Image (spheres, helix red, strand yellow):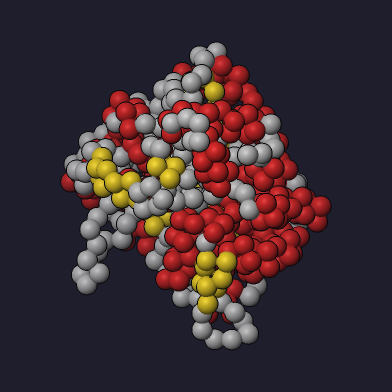
Amino acid sequence: MGIEIDRTTFTSSDYRRFFDALLGNLAVLEDLLATPGFGKGAGSIGAELEMYIVDRDGSPLHLNQEIREAARDPQLTLELNRYNLEYNLTPCALGNSPFVAIEEEIISKLAYVGKIAETVNGRIVPIGILPTLRQSDLGTHCVTDRKRYHALVKQLLRRSAKFRIDIDGEDPLQLDMADITLEGANTSFQVHYRVQPQHFADTFNAIQLMTPLAMAVAANSPTLFGHRLWHETRVPLFKQSIDTRQVDRYSWNEPARVNFGQGWVRQGALELFTEVVRIYPPLLPVCAPRLPPERDQAPDQTPSLDELRLHQSTVWLWNRPVYDNVDGGHLRIEMRALPAGPTAVDMAANAAFLIGLAEGVRADINHILPALPFGIAEYNFYRAAKHGLNARLVWPNHRKSGYEEQPVCAIVARLLPTALEGLISIGISPAEGARYLGVIERRLERRQTGATWQLAKLTSLQATMPMEAALHVMLEEFIRHSQGNLPVSEWPL
């Protein structure tokens, strides 16, 4: 999804050729999905972990290219801002203890890149939004020097010369930004789940349904520039830093490029890919080189669909379909709503909880969805992001008609056995499932997530010091606990 490009300016003919290529890609994908046996294979889980680089004082350190070059690790990639990196973790088959593997690989990779960062007086932090980030850390000077990022900045600024940030909360934040580097303030733990094509629609809908619950118990981004905002401030910040507009509800509006989706999936993956092509104008219209017919791909080589994959990477759905030509071609669901951090065990638990919930209800999803219109699911998503464990969500009651708001903690507690059943149904051992769901259960008991811990810690520190100092002190304690892989539910205040 992070395909590099070779230029930053485009002509009208570039857009025409690219759109024609997208339509061709969709036709090829439709044929692939109709091919018996396509996408078959063992289910697997992978992830991308975005990280901050900070200096000894806890401020952003603009050295991602230097650290990546020194690390010489092909799994380590560059992000939009020069103080962010991303690790592409190794996919693991469902039968090979994938959540244990994710936890162990995060620990080892963070330790390795952390040692590299130490050579330039830097440290690595997995956190949704760096609490010590300042407005002076944003701007064109912090953009990573890749053509893809320069082109993306230019294209988005063509659509809107200024982005309005307006986030409510305990201490609301309003400001205007003339660039998109605030997008890079958000770091996520993006989970990839390989699914069979025939199960794609039901699995995708189940993940959409359950994402608000997972986000509420995973929240880890409560502040920005010293303002106490949403428990998962990444959600409104990412949306507004990419795509701010004044919406007139009585006229038509182009759908935002950052959104929860257009509705429940009715048939399968193809409709989601088609929506992205037909709804969103291309931002990076770069066609892949075409070989002469006599040198084109062999008949048994799976099409790469480069244009479709590039275009998909410029539409930031919170849950996104992914096509990959690896292993004969397959489909994945990318879950983008979970934040980075606080620890490896917490991130593995978040992934296990969301996938377990989705698989636990997948068989009944078409009986559940009529009781929950898509607009209400989207409402739940934003309520969970804003209030975290304090959220009240609209949730169906199978014993009666109508709706009622319920505390998210009560819903999660009630569904933990369903999540365990879902994990076991896809080949996760009962012991592995119970271990990671126990991490979630403990958060409910303690009413403590990364977000609630940060907010409570700041309140305590501000009794004896100003906000800026409190943010730095809090970050130091966050880093210490994170490196110890102590579940956030057990962090002392």
x and y, in percent, of residue 125 in the image = 54, 31
430 lies left or right of 206:
right
Q: Nearer the viewer, residue 465 or 191?
A: 465
Q: Residue furthest bottom?
A: 400
The residue sitting at 53% across, 28% down in the picture is: 473
Residue shown at the point (32%, 28%) measured from the top left = 136
Can residue 372 be seen in this snapshot?
A: yes
Picture residue at 59% right of the left edge, 54% below the top: 217
| Rendered image quadrant of residue 209 | bottom right
Closer to us: 435 or 22:
435
Residue 188 drawn at (x, y percent): 50, 43
**Residue visible at 36% across and 53% down?**
168
- The image quadrant where one finds the N terminus is top left
Q: Height in image: 15 above or below 60?
A: below
For the image, the number of numbered tags is 0
Q: Nearer the viewer, residue 249 or 451?
A: 451
Where's the C terminus, which quadrant?
Answer: top right
- From this view, report whether residue 84 is shown above or below residue 307: above
Outermost residue toward the front?
Answer: 464
Task: Farthest residue to the top: give it.
Answer: 119
* Relative to 223, 124 lies left or right: right
Relative image position of residue 237 (x, y in whole percent) = 38, 47
**Residue 325 seen:** no
Determine the residue located farthest toward the right in the rendered image. Answer: 431
